[in-house]
Image (cartoon, helix red, strand yellow):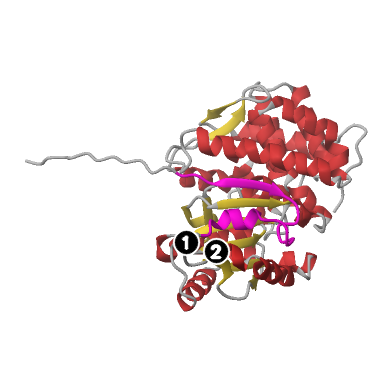
Amino acid sequence: MSTVHHQTFAVPYAFDAHFTRDVFAPDNDALVKAMHPRVGGRPARALIYVDEGAIRQNPKLIQAIHLWFAAHEADGVQLAAAPEVIPGGEALKGEIAILDKVGRACFDNGICRHSYIIIIGGGAVLDAVGFAASIVHRGIRQIRLPTTVLAQCDAGLGVKNGVNRFGSKNFYGTFTPPSTIINDARFLESLDDRSWRAGIAEAVKVAIIKDADFLVQLGERAVKLRERDLATMEWLIERCALLHLDHITKAGDPFEQGSSRPLDFGHWSAHRMETLSNHRLLHGEAVAIGVAIDSLYAVELGRITAEEGDRILTILATCGFRLWDEVLDLRDATGHRAVLIGLTQFREHLGGELTLAMPEGLGKRSDIHDFEEPLFERVLTRLKRWRPANVPVPTR
């Protein structure tokens, strides 16, 4: 005989998303507010990790950080050690050495669960250092300062972090909400063109499945985005970020206990293309192609019209994306396209049942659980031949 005593409890989470410029200007107090200093008590202490790419773009960033903390020490915030510069990109996520690097610094500097780890960088640095922070003392408070368009409108916003292992994206990781997210538009001004453009794909993605009006506006402003108009990019990032945050906080499954993952529209092939290209493709570049693929697949299923599919591809091309890459032609020993392994990996990541988000008309979505390879072949044939009308074909 056995008995079962079912227990349940809920833990509320809350975090702030700041949109600002010049976060380390002496008169900007966004970071003071984020660190919640205790009046009359011990200072709020922080370790800081900085993406070396952010340093290349802003060589005076470390100096600005030191000066900012010196100016605000009386406000109850303190650096626990000099900021550490680490390499960014997917190579960082391919090794687990970052876990011991962060853990050792926390141990040596007496970082406790009421301290902070401030992460400044692109999505890979946010993911890897965030994962390390989430397992030290079972979780150190994270403050994320995304420095790329992709990170500010998507990668830096969610509750996930992780590193890649065994050729699988984010194989190790946790669900750990940040304490605060601070999007500083000044970081975007020095991005190279590819990094500027990459994050736009995530905005197109979320507009297709959640906000048809946003998609129309992206089409109207695509040329300004390609021409690097900062105000237009700030508009895109805040609109995209709020749509992502609305889903994370209100859709009822922030830790992805179920199989439905609407925000991964276009991602099953994107993750695989990144691996197949040895990360020659940036994540956002792969997502743009993946969104194009899934949009044309939705046309084949009759979920959106051919005209709507063409409009999506035209927006992406106008923003400067290439919508075909040679990795799509790679095949395995059985003759199947190598990218299709992405479906298997996606299914395993979801828990065993294939679930792909698809538009059900622009601005809405529903999931599918079957994938037809003949339709996929028709999609790739069309995509390879597709050329936008009156839009320069983008080049690298």
Residue appearing at x 75%, y 36% in the figure: 381
Nearest the eye: 93 or 268: 93
Q: Position of residue 254 (x, y in %)?
A: 48, 41
Q: Which region of the structure is painted magenta?
A: 13-37
- The answer to whether 204 is drawn above or below residue 124 in the figure is above
Whether 32 is among the magenta residues is yes
Instruction: Specify the label residue 140 is tagged with.
Output: 1
Nearest the eye: 166 or 42: 42
> Along the horizontal axis of the image, is 271 left or right of 394?
left
Residue appearing at x 69%, y 22% in the figure: 304
Q: Position of residue 203 (x, y in %)?
A: 71, 39
Nearest the eye: 280 or 98: 98
The amino acid on which the numbered mark 2 sits, given as a three-letter code, is Ile
Question: What element does badge 1 sit on?
Answer: loop
- The answer to whether 103 is drawn above or below residue 145 in the figure is below
Question: What element does badge 2 sit on?
Answer: strand
Furthest toward the front, the residue is 40
Q: Which quarter of the figure has residue 186?
A: bottom right
Residue where numbered disc 2 is placed: 117
Furthest toward the left, the residue is 1
Q: Quadrant of the N terminus?
A: top left
